[in-house]
Image (tube, rainbow, N blue to C red):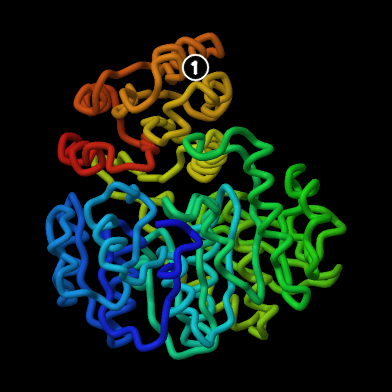
Amino acid sequence: MSQDDNHHRIPSGIRRVHLIAACGTAMGALAAMLQELGLSVTGSDRNVYPPMSTFLQDRGIHVQEGFTAEHLAYRPDLVVVGNAVSRDNPEVVAVAQMGLNYCSMPEALNHFAAAGKETLLVAGTHGKTTTSSLLAWLLYAAKTDPTYMIGGILNNFNGNYRMGRGAYFVVEGDEYDTAYFDKGPKFLHYRPKAAVLTSVEFDHADIFDDLAHVKSAFGRFLERLAPESVLLAYDDDANIEALLPRATCRVERYGRSEKAAWRLGRVQLNPPETRFEVWRNGRLFGEFATRMIGEHNLMNTLAALGVAHHIGIEARVLADGLAGFRGIKRRQEVRGVRRGIVVIDDFAHHPSAVRETVRAVKAFYGQRRLVAVFEPRTNTSMRDVFQDTYSTCFDPADLVCIRHPPLLSKIPSGERFSSEKLVEDLRERGKDAFFFPDTAAIIDHLTASSREGDVILIMSNGGFDNIHVRLLEALA
């Protein structure tokens, strides 16, 4: 199959849909959304296990183990191909042989979930999930009944998708490639009424060659924005600055600059809240309070407030909505407290995200000892591209624990990240840093060395061998 194949279209009258690799976070949410729209949905995946297996099972969606042409014997009207699926997948081969209609996940999402709605999209290397989650919640709290699909679990809804009857569709615009037959970024499939650009940095080293390659993808996104749309762009990012001339729509900047249309004013830390002012075009827009930690989250909030106001929601309504936002799982999520020791889970993995998260948590918890635990496991963090950069990201931490990358064999031997070298570099900077070969060793060390008042910040984009639960049990 190729991108130009005649079957790479979504015809009208679709009733039965099959998803190849249905157990990913986004694909599972799409399956549930399609079913809520009244379609008959099936799926398949190589790893069918909780929580996604039970999530789909509870909704009456049958997902079969493994990939085989037999799963398509009933000839579904449409097959959605996940981006982790390769062209030699048995079901992909069968789709071609049977002449079935097929498409990618974002194409299906755009066709079914966003149909007849105005799309509000959040793009950027960092902050996409938080900003889009907050935007979705603000719209819901303002009683606009939004539809959304996001890469994180919103605590307010205990889910990452929602089918609403309102006019707006909120989506996290991912720069990662779409499918094996479409190597363009996912965000190119949407035509947003309003968009946010939070940041542009090198990431996803498995699909992007360098920063210039990343910038070219975001540049294409800016060029495709409709002239009547609006883009809210962060005002303290040199890469965004270089790309903005390619945008043909109205641009509003947000940040700390006096020139920014949306400016962060006075900030007051008042645990468990942060109170802050927002100024718009030189006038006080409103005073707000949030339980999210760190200036980077205030910037995410600023962007979400800007988009929500752009579609007509008043500052007073937004303030009430923000006060009720309960955050996102795995984003500075307090997993528990034992013996006065706080254990926090965070998704941070890119150096910039690690740096901002460590700094934010340290500032929020003041004089308490901060223990930073990091597992490099993304395709980028397991490469040596940021080997030196990571050593500068843990300065506010009092103790640093670095795990051996668990999937290092996936990376060519000459390109591998070294956790041992990172620890050496951290020690040269005067940090109390330790290397651990596995998760059990970290738990043993923290159980023996932690004391009342400690804050343990655990950062990984994966499950980290259930370290949070195991550590809390050991501390108890």
Q: Quadrant of residue 340?
A: top left
Question: Looking at the rendering, in which quadrant would you find the C terminus?
Answer: top left
As displayed, is residue 166 above or below residue 189? below
Q: Please say whether residue 226 is visible from this viewpoint.
A: yes
Residue 169, position as x, y percentages in the image: 51, 78
Question: Looking at the rendering, in which quadrant would you find the N terminus?
Answer: bottom left
Q: Residue under label 1, please give it.
A: 431
Residue placed most toward the observer, 277 or 16: 16
As displayed, is residue 307 above or below residue 445? below
As displayed, is residue 397 above or below residue 200? above
Q: Is residue 283 left or right of residue 192?
A: right
Q: Is residue 226 left or right of residue 110?
A: right
Q: Counting other residues with Cα less than 10 Å from the Cα at mark 1, is it few (<14), some (14-19), or many (20 or more)?
A: some
Q: Residue at 79%, 56% (x, y): give it.
A: 246
Residue 121, position as x, y percentages in the image: 58, 67
Q: Is residue 460 left or right of residue 266?
A: left
